[in-house]
Image (tube, rainbow, N blue to C red):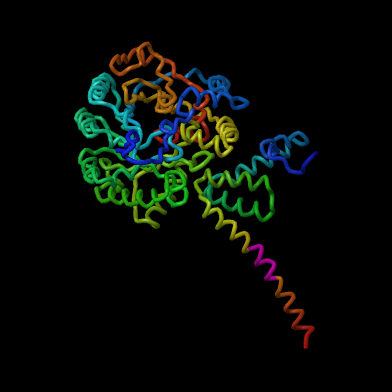
């Protein structure tokens, strides 16, 4: 393997069934059901997936849900706003842990 | 009109493939490039066969589509017609329009779909509309919106409204970025001004005699979305952002020919886009393909299975494919001419001049 990530793996994802077909089928059935139109639209689910993809920094998912979001009618500005939501949550998650720091500093300091 | 011939008229930015003398102006060059893409499953007829479907044949002429010319006030980057202000020669004359009307009288087509270029710039456009309306046919004007702002077209919304003509307008997105990227800077604002003129003329408010349809195609190398899913969002956002109302949304895929093919080549997207189209082949989209219910006439009167075949010079497979020699029986028995570009209409939700085919 000359590189850990290969773009063609995204299109070959279904081949993961080679090791365990029944579990793969359960997973892909579940996956398909999750992204079907429901209380949320397919477009809203794509934008959530795009934001999560950046949070977990999965290049396959970024590839898939960039195209997916465009094909569901989102434009760059809307997609970028979704990313900023993820970025804000990631940054906020770091910053809010500062409360632990602050509490300790307050306890240990004079 | 744009004067490209005289030195006195000064230099011009010529943007059609034809006026740039691009090899892609030739249909055979476009077909050669498409056939040269290394593509698994890239034979359209075999894809039909593999899905258990018969060869494509027409089901009957429901829509009589007349492309009255390639003259346009715009030069959009994705244009499959390679239309532009310099395409002054390719404009349907009155004799050919009368031949179209005579042919129309020999069909049961419920709709006459008038397209271009900007069809409004053909000098016989209004004559054609009046003749079709007098025959009781539903008429569609495929409008680029910005043409409505030309001084010569000021009265056009009222003209169309009085005759119950459906206006089908191109708009890639309800937000600015994608529209201007595809159709040129400033197009978005002009399009909104034109849509407001149509709203003022009674279009877009649910009146069946004033139907305003928006036609969205992707601004890039990806498939069109589901029009059923997107229409409610578009209506909400067009009203919220711009105070504009419309009746329905059509979504269609970009066809990998003419200027969109040029963009695919220049941007390095041709291989990926063709793979996307073939991988997304949807057998369920085949029955509703427009080549099965539409007959397409070119500015010079030739007959084609669709507007895309027209641009690729793939004439209808009958002995004399010309509107002067109109033969309903021969046309009904013909086989639709196919090539790789046909994957553009069968991908995803299916794609046609009437929107998705599923």
User: In the rendered view, does B228 fall on the left or right side of B206?
Assistant: right
Q: Is residue B358 visible?
A: no
Q: Is residue B256 above or below residue A40?
A: above
Q: Could you tell me residue A63's position as x and y percent? A: 63, 45
Q: Could you tell me residue B203's position as x and y percent? A: 28, 46
Q: Residue furthest front?
A: B8
| Image quadrant assignment for residue B322 | top left
Between B193 and B226, the residue placed more toward the observer is B193
Q: Is residue B235 visible?
A: yes
Residue drawn at 61 percent across, 42 percent down: A32
User: In the rendered view, does A38 fall on the left or right side of A9?
Assistant: left
Residue drawn at 33 percent across, 44 percent down: B145
Q: How many labels sit on residues?
A: 0
User: In the rendered view, does B252 fall on the left or right side of A37?
Assistant: left
Q: Could you tell me residue A80's position as x and y percent? A: 56, 55
Q: Could you tell me residue A61's position as x and y percent? A: 65, 47
Residue drawn at 24 percent across, 33 percent down: B123
| Image quadrant assignment for residue B68 | top left
Quadrant of the image for the N terminus of chain B? top left
Q: Residue furthest top?
A: B319
Between B298 and B318, the residue placed more toward the observer is B298
Q: Residue furthest bottom?
A: A110
Between A23 and A86, the residue placed more toward the observer is A86
User: In the rendered view, does A110 fall on the left or right side of B232?
Assistant: right
Q: Is residue B302 above or below residue B175?
A: above
Magenta residues: mostly which secondary structure? Answer: helix
Between B257 and B102, the residue placed more toward the observer is B257
Magenta stretch: give its range: A89-96
Residue drawn at 40 percent across, 43 percent down: B249
């Amino acid at each position: 393997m000359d590189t850990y990530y290969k773009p063609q793996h995204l299109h070959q994802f279904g081949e993961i069934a080679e090791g365990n077909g029944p579990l793969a089928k359960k997973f892909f059935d579940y996956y398909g059901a999750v992204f079907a139109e429901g209380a949320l639209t397919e477009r809203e689910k794509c934008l959530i997936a795009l934001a999560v993809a950046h949070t977990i920094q999965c290049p396959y998912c970024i590839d898939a849900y960039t195209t997916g979001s465009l094909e569901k009618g989102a434009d760059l500005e809307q997609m970028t706003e979704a990313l900023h939501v993820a970025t804000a949550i990631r940054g906020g998650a770091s910053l809010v842990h500062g409360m632990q720091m602050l509490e300790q500093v307050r306890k240990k300091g004079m | 009109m744009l004067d490209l011939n005289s030195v006195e008229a000064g230099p011009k930015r010529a943007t059609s493939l034809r006026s740039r003398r691009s090899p892609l102006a030739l249909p055979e060059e476009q077909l050669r490039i498409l056939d040269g893409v290394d593509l698994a499953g890239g034979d359209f007829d075999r894809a039909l066969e593999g899905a258990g479907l018969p060869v494509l044949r027409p089901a009957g002429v429901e829509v009589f589509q007349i492309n009255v010319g390639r003259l346009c006030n715009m030069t959009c980057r994705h244009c499959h017609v390679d239309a532009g202000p310099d395409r002054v020669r390719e404009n349907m004359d009155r004799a050919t329009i009368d031949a179209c009307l005579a042919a129309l009288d020999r069909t049961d087509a419920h709709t006459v779909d008038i397209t271009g270029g900007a069809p409004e710039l053909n000098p016989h456009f209004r004559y054609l509309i009046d003749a079709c309306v007098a025959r009781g046919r539903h008429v569609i004007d495929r409008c680029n919106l910005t043409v409505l702002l030309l001084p010569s077209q000021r009265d056009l919304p009222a003209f169309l409204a009085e005759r119950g003509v459906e206006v089908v307008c191109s708009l890639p997105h309800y937000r600015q970025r994608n529209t201007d990227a595809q159709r040129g800077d400033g197009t978005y604002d002009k399009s909104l001004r034109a849509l407001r003129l149509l709203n003022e003329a009674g279009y877009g408010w649910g009146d069946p005699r004033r139907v305003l349809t928006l036609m969205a195609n992707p601004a890039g190398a990806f498939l069109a979305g589901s029009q059923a899913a997107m229409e409610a969002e578009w209506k909400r956002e067009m009203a919220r952002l711009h105070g504009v109302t419309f009746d329905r949304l059509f979504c269609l895929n970009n066809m990998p020919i003419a200027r969109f093919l040029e963009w695919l080549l220049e941007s390095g997207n041709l291989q990926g886009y063709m793979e996307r189209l073939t991988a997304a082949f949807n057998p369920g989209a085949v029955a509703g393909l427009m080549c099965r219910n539409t007959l397409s006439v070119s500015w010079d009167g030739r007959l084609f299975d669709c507007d895309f075949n027209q641009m690729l010079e793939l004439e209808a497979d009958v002995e004399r494919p010309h509107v002067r020699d109109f033969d309903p029986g021969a046309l009904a028995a013909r086989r639709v001419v196919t090539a790789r570009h046909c994957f553009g209409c069968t991908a995803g939700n299916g794609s046609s001049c009437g929107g998705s085919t599923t």
